[in-house]
Amino acid sequence: MIWLGIETANGPLSIAVVKEGKVVAEVVQHIKLTHSVGAMPAIEEVMMRAGVTAVEIDAIAVSEGPGSYTGVRIGVTLAKTLAWSLQKPLVGVSSLKALAANARVSNDVVCALFDARRQNIYAGVYEGLTQVPIIEDHHDHIDGLLTNLDALKRPVLFVGADVDLYFEKIQEVLGERAIRAPFTLDLPRASELIAIAEKQELPSVEAVHAFVPQYRRIAEAEANWIKEHKKEQP
């Protein structure tokens, strides 16, 4: 079986082709190039290097969020368009779970984290080896996350390029229980996305139409509209 994986949920970009459980080609990068410009060329390049044509793809895995509203939307739109045009099943995978999978060899609690601005974060907390969720993917203030992690009374391995924004505060709360993952684990990999998707039951092709991102919060523009609308009410 041949999988195409698409990861654009945040700043990093990763595209992979996996054939019969083996990574054939993969791109992982974190450069200042918007996904609207770089994602499709990366897909074409990875498929070319893998020697795979579009019609040979059996299924597509995509990072469904949470993360950057624009990044998630671009990846999902690309994946849905390809899946429907090729008549292939589409599987969505949590962007946080895919990132946490980089540290699946750890016995510790693994916290995957993305910055959501203004001291807010997206986070998911998992058992390192089994990937079983301990705290489901959510949006919260960093203080709320740290309160919940402190209550676990266990060492926590933090993974993600945005962890450095908060690690000083993390150490203040968790002390020696806070462990920083090596930087080599900080970027999400589309191959891990596929590895998770392979364990799920393939949906029907018709389900592509109903596929929606999992933002875990409303968009900022929508939040501002609601806020202003409430002010106008008597």
Image (cartoon, rainbow, N blue to C red):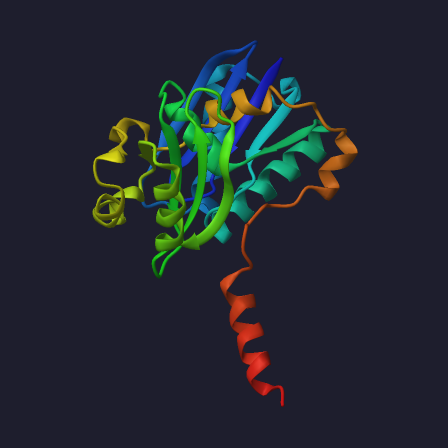
Question: Is 229 left, or right, of 140 in this rendering?
Answer: right
Where does the image place residue 54, in percent across and percent down from the top left?
Answer: 62, 24
Front-most of 60 and 45? 60
Question: In the picture shown, does residue 75 fall above or below 61?
Answer: below
Question: In the picture shown, does residue 120 fall above or below 81?
Answer: below
Question: Is 162 left, or right, of 189 in this rendering?
Answer: left
Where does the image place residue 163, in percent across and percent down from the top left?
Answer: 30, 42
Q: Residue at x 55, y 50 (%)?
A: 215
Question: Is 66 left, or right, of 182 in this rendering?
Answer: right
Where does the image place residue 210, in percent across and percent down from the top left?
Answer: 73, 43
Q: Which residue is drawn at 58% across and 20% down?
A: 3
Front-most of 169 and 63? 169
Q: Quadrant of residue 199?
A: top right
Looking at the rendered structure, the number of numbered marks drawn on it comes to 0
Q: In which quadrant is the N terminus drawn?
A: top right
Visible in this render: residue 7? no
Q: Quadrant of residue 117?
A: bottom left
Front-most of 107 and 61? 107
Q: In which quadrant is the C terminus drawn?
A: bottom right
Question: In the picture shown, does residue 86 fall above or below 33?
Answer: above
Question: In the picture shown, does residue 217 fall above or below 105?
Answer: below
Visible in this render: residue 36? yes
Where does the image place residue 66, in percent across and percent down from the top left?
Answer: 50, 45
